[in-house]
Image (cartoon, rainbow, N blue to C red):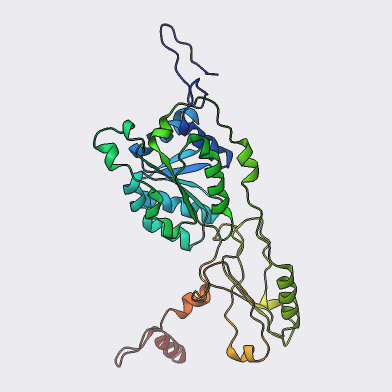
Amino acid sequence: MTETIDRPDAPPILVPGSYGQQRFGSDVVVDLLRGFGIEYAALNPGATYRGLHDSIVNYGGNKPEMILCTHEEIAVSIAHGYAKVTGKPMAAIVHDVVGLLHAAMTIYYAFIDRVPLVLIGATGPLDRTKRRPYIDWIHSALVQGNAVRDYVKWDDQPATIADFPASFARAYRIATTEPAGPVYLCYDAGLQEDPLDAPVPVDAVLRGALPSPVQADPRALERAAELLAGAERPAIITEFTARHAPAPVHRLDPQRARPGERGARLHEVGRPARGRRGLPRLVRARLPHRDDRARGARLPLLRRGPPGGPAREAGPDRRRRGRRAPRASAGRPTRARAGRRHAREGR
């Protein structure tokens, strides 16, 4: 069905967001983006995904909403930050091999930060009979994901339009399963622009692709509870905690300990998983001193990142310790010493 605007002596005009009679392969990608709840797509326009660009505007009615960027690194960085704030994946679209290589550094950042991200790319027609002279030949690559395969969780280049739904659903499931990370999907420019002979449904993959939350081993939880309950000075070390809004956040407050006790302390390794503006935050404290460990402190380590990474102290304590006090010179006292001298002299 097509919505039209009536004008005298003028041809019908297709309203953005309406359904035309003819559908194309890139329309299926738009159906998948919208079906999986991806609301935004950051991109730097390129010729290899001109079909997808056209489908987002004329078939999807600019849903997902496009965020125009001047460079692929900016597009992927926006998707990275969006995932950190919302806990949900966003799409970033890059052009061919050149756009993918431009974005390589920011893809790596998303990978080591364990954020879900759907990276969409495109290549020139793999069918050589459909290639234009020169430009499509230099914009065509076989297994384009090889360029970033070492730092994405999964990549795919579906060979038929009928395989678009299954490929996208698997990519979404892998990207959002903890530990999360970026995935790369590459679409043939020829397939994007091919007309559909029959509808390609996506409802079946929508129901089965959303992952269930990862659960801890019940026996390991029982053992951790026993260690914490029997410890004199418990301390918990966490990493990437409370990334998702529904995750329970238990705040440990050392100030509420009974007289004579130092209370439970919490230490987060690396950067906090959630930021400001009302999102869950954890109480951070210093790591127990070696004397505490000698007296029976329990240190459960809860982490999702790569094992063996450095344990850095987070929070304001770390920032304060990183600042050095100004050195006093022979003829010029520091500001702190001058203040104490003035106080003694009654100034």
- Which is nearer the eye, 132 or 15? 132
Q: Position of residue 94 (x, y in %)?
A: 38, 45
Q: Residue at x 34, y 45 (%)?
A: 141
Q: In the visual, does 125 lie left or right of 319?
A: left
- Which is nearer the eye, 260 or 57? 57
Q: In the visual, does 189 lie left or right of 169?
A: left
Q: Residue at x 52, y 35 (%)?
A: 162
Q: In the visual, does 204 lie left or right of 144?
A: right
Q: Residue at x 50, y 20 (%)?
A: 21
Q: Position of residue 326 (x, y in %)?
A: 37, 84
| Above-or-below relation of 116 to 294 | above
Q: Position of residue 51 (x, y in %)?
A: 40, 33
Point out the residue furthest to the top here: 9
* Residue 87 seen in the figure: no
Count all numbered tags in the image, as a single digit.
0
- Which is nearer the eye, 297 or 263? 297
Q: Quadrant of residue 286?
A: bottom right
- Which is nearer the eye, 140 or 182? 140
Q: Position of residue 123 (x, y in %)?
A: 36, 41
Quarter of the image containing the N terminus? Answer: top right
| Above-or-below relation of 44 to 245 | above
Quarter of the image containing the C terminus? Answer: bottom left
* Residue 134 seen in the figure: yes
| Above-or-below relation of 286 to 58 | below
Point out the residue furthest to the left here: 134
